[in-house]
Amino acid sequence: MKTLRIFFFLSLMAAGLSVMAQTKDSSAPHVDLIVIDGSINPAVDDFIRESIGRAKSSGARALLIQLDTPGGLLSSTRTIVKDMLSAQVPIMVYVAPSGSGAGSAGVFITMAAHVAAMAPATNIGAAHPVAGGGQEVKGVMGEKIENFTASFSETIAQKRGRNTEWAIQAVRRSVAITETDALKKNVIDIVAKDIDDLLRQADGRKVDLDGRMTTLSVKGASVVRHEMSLKQRIINAIADPNIAYMLLMAGILGLYMEFSNPGVLLPGVAGALCMIMALISLQLLSFNYAGLILIVLGIGLLIGEAFMPSFGILGIGGVISLALGSFLLFDTPNSDLSIDRSIIITAVATMASLIFAISYLVFRSQKIRPTMGMEGLLGEIGEVRRKLSPSGKVFVHGEYWNAQADGEIDVGERIQVVGYDGMNLKVKRLPERAS
């Protein structure tokens, strides 16, 4: 009993020391770090918003965002910038590691930071709004989007005291510069070789926290890295045009195989899951309805070719429609994301090859002569066993049949089945073989 009391007392002491250690660690100077490596989408938006709130509540000296992005959704970018400009905790954006870049949406996020930094051998720029396929948005709509994006970039630069002229040119002329030029042109504040170097250079800088000037004290602070939650990782993974497109193709293919072979189950279940995930992904991304309609039409034409062979007319039309729909699926002015061309070519070729193969098998099966039933006897050779005058009996295919001929045929002569009437065969005399 005494031993149990001692063990219980020691356990309480250990728990108390653990709580004290955690309290001490949470109060120690630290900087929260998150890494954004990929496109800007709703999952990244949610992750950054959550990280800003966590950094504020935990008393972090700053929130450090390590960034490497080719761009993303304009809607998500605007929300992220809005949260950054009104943040109550200093935010540092660090374009790193070497070889990384802040393209398109990344330009606005970098400039919206209280401290903007880049690693050596990185670049920033090319923020001109484009359609999903990478081409320029034409007409009045393109002009409106360009003017809005340029003013958006200018506003951010003015708010953070950065080069507004370059910010405008990054949108209107898609200019991109290296970290050295970005520092010279007052696009960023620091060029740092690593995070420790960044914290050392940023220490002592004054930043504006929504109207309140604060001096950064981050030198020597510990760096606490935070990861996306499971939900955010899943959304981030499927909010990718390439993933969304492959899920859509896999879903259509799985459902097609299930409907053409009812009861197999596995293709149907897998196809349904892929289709649901694809629809969720399309909801997260900005997509073109015309592209989706063309994809559905293309699949319909290819299936039509499989069940109603049209000597390639439906199939060729289906391939063209599927390819056009694939290229147009994410062709929108609200995003600069696009599907990799190699994925489109592979998917279209695979889908078309499979459908054409099924079409060929169906066509060939229709041409094969039946081997069972009355139709299977057509063309068979037999022998007369009871004189046909014109009716009698013949031995065909190992069986005796009632038969009828146009004229008399003697017993023992060879005949060939040319038709049937109910259960009676119609036959004709075979010519005598040359001796």
Image: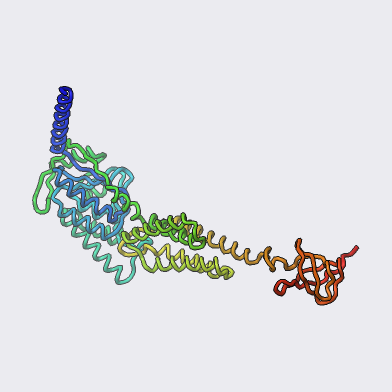
Q: Position of residue 65 (x, y in %)?
A: 23, 46
Q: Residue at x 31, y 44 (%)?
A: 121
Q: Position of residue 288 (x, y in %)?
A: 36, 66
In this picture, residue 236 sits left or right of residue 387: left
Q: Position of residue 316 (x, y in %)?
A: 53, 67
Q: Position of residue 41 (x, y in %)?
A: 29, 55
Report the front residue among 95 and 320: 320
The total of numbered circles placed on residues is: 0
Figure check: 318 above or below 281: below
Figure check: 109 above or below 409: above
In this picture, residue 390 sits left or right of residue 183: right
Figure check: 38 above or below 304: above
Report the front residue among 282 and 290: 282
* The C terminus - image quarter: bottom right
Colour scheme: rainbow
Q: Residue at x 16, y 40 (%)?
A: 218
* The N terminus - image quarter: top left
